[in-house]
Each structure stands twice: as C-alpha cells, then as structure tokens.
Image (spheres, grey):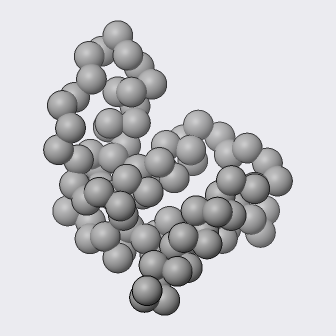
C-alpha cells in the first residue's frame, strides 16, 4: 500500500473522531473529497430538486470533476488534519 493511501485511510479513521462536528459546508467538502478520492468523477444521475441533501452532496462532488484521485486524497488528508488541530 502506498504511503498516500495509508495516510488517507488514517485520515478517514480520524474524521470519525473529530472533537467537534464540522459545519455543513465542511461536511460536504469532506464527503466530496472522499468520493472523488475513492470513486473518481461523479457519474451518478443528478438527484431531483426535492431531495436537497442528496442534491447538495451531488453538487459538491461534481465540482471536483477532473481532480485526480491522489490529489483528492491529499486534499482530504490536509482538511482532516486542519480540523483536528482546531
């Protein structure tokens, strides 16, 4: 396993034990970076406008289109590190 992947997996574990719950914008960013890092570009069908939560998640992930998996992993690691430091 690459060092980046190991650090990413540690950041995923660390994200579950943050001392404070991040705000919704930050939660969407965490979600989107995770999806981009693990699945690549968003190819899912856009949810209807009545499902606001799913739509917000979809939009956040779609904004990262074209971001490479490694780059998304590194951004995820950096974000979780910042949140842990407070």
Residue 58 sits in quarter: top left
Q: How many labels does the image show?
A: 0
Q: Which residue occupies the extreme right position in the image? A: 19
Furthest toward the front, the residue is: 1
The x and y percentages for residue 69 are: 31, 70
Where 82 sits versus 1, above or below? above
The residue most toward the top is 50
Q: In which quarter of the image is residue 34?
A: bottom left
Q: Nearer the viewer, residue 79 or 35?
A: 35
- In this picture, is 67 found above or below 46? below
Task: Name the residue located 26 percent from the left edge and 71 percent from the top edge.
Answer: 68
Q: Which of 25 and 73 is in front in this view?
A: 73
Question: Residue shown at 35%/10% (left/top)?
Answer: 50
| Quadrant for the C terminus in the image | bottom right
Quarter of the rendering containing residue 66: bottom left
Q: Is the residue 16 above or below the residue 53 in the image?
A: below
Residue 5 vs 9, above or below: the answer is: below
Residue 48, percent from left and from top = 26, 16
Looking at the image, residue 47 sits to the left or right of residue 86; the answer is left
Please provide percent x and percent y for residue 13.
64, 63
Q: In this view, does 12 lie to the left or right of 34?
A: right
- Image location of residue 82, percent across then percent down: 67, 68
**What's the residue at 36%, 74% (across, down)?**
71
In this rendered view, identify the residue nearer to me: 28 or 16. Answer: 16
Q: In which quarter of the image is the N terminus?
A: bottom left
């Amino acid at each position: 396993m690459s060092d980046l992947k190991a650090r990413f997996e540690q950041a995923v574990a660390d994200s579950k034990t943050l001392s404070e719950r991040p705000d919704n914008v930050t939660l969407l960013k965490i979600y989107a970076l995770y999806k981009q890092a693990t699945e690549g570009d968003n190819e899912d069908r856009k949810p209807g406008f009545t499902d606001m939560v799913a739509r917000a998640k979809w939009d956040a992930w779609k904004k990262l289109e074209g971001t490479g998996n490694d780059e998304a992993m590194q951004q995820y690691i950096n974000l979780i590190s910042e949140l842990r430091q407070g």
